[in-house]
Image (cartoon, helix red, strand yellow):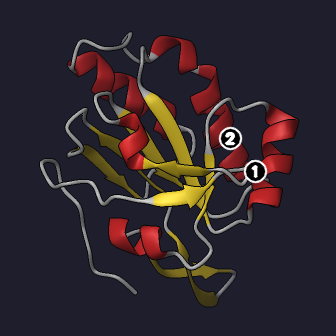
Amino acid sequence: MTTTRLAPGDPAPAFTLPDQHDEPVSLADFAGRHVLVFFYPKAGTSGCTTQACGLRDVAGRIGSTAVVGISPDPPSRQAAWDAKHGFGFPLLSDPDHAVADAYGVWGPKKLYGREYEGIIRSAFLVDPDGRIAEAWYRISPKATPDKLLTALAERGIAEEAS
C-alpha cells in the first residue's frame, strides 16, 4: 500500500506505459497542454464504462486537453473495451501498479466484505508544465467529466459543467 498523496503544485509522476494498441505512451508526450490522467479499477465494468464514456462524451468541450486512462488491465482487454465504446483516448496498462503507486491510488479496498488491494478510482488534472493542477481521490464515475469541465472552465479552457 502506498501513502503518497499528490496535491496541486506537486510534480506529476512521469510514466511510460503500453496503450490499448501496445504502443508506448508517456506523460511527456502531452507536455505543453493539460492532461487528465484517470485511474480506474477494471476495463469493461459498469462504473469504469460510465466514467470513460462520460469523458468521451465531453471531449468536444475540453479544448486541447488530453485524456489518458490507466488500469492494471492488459492492452488486449483495454483494446476490446475501446473497440466496443470508441473512447478516442489512450487506455494504458499498469499491471504491476507502479504508476498507480506513484500517484497514490493503489491501496486497500473492500467488496462484499472481502478486503484486497486495488485501484482507488481517482483523477488528476496535470497542467502544461507537468504539475498537478487538481487531484480527485476516490472520485465517482459520474462526477469525473463534471469535475474536469469545472476545473478547465476555472482556467478559461472549457465550457462550464452543466
Residue type beneath disc 2: Thr
> Which quadrant of the structure image shows residue 17?
bottom right
Q: Is residue 80 above or below residue 118?
A: above
Q: Is residue 128 above or below residue 111?
A: above
Q: Residue at x 30, y 14 (%)?
A: 157
Q: Measure how far apart labels 1 and 2 are at the Cα level.
A: 6 Å
Give the residue at mark 1: 46
Badge 2 element: helix
In this rendered view, identify the residue nearer to me: 6 or 18: 18
Tag 1–tag 2 contact (CB < 8 Å): yes
Q: Is residue 63 above or below residue 38?
A: above
Q: Is residue 104 left or right of residue 76?
A: left
Q: Residue at x 26, y 74 (%)?
A: 4
Q: Residues within 10 Å of mark 1 (few under 14, many from 20)?
A: few
Residue type beneath disc 1: Ser
Task: Identify the disc placed on residue 50.
Answer: 2
Q: Is residue 43 above or below residue 161?
A: below
Number of numbered discs: 2
Task: Identify the image quadrant of the N terminus.
Answer: bottom left
Can residue 54 be seen by looking at this rendering? yes
Percent of width and height locating residue 57? 63, 22
Can residue 40 be seen by looking at this rendering? no
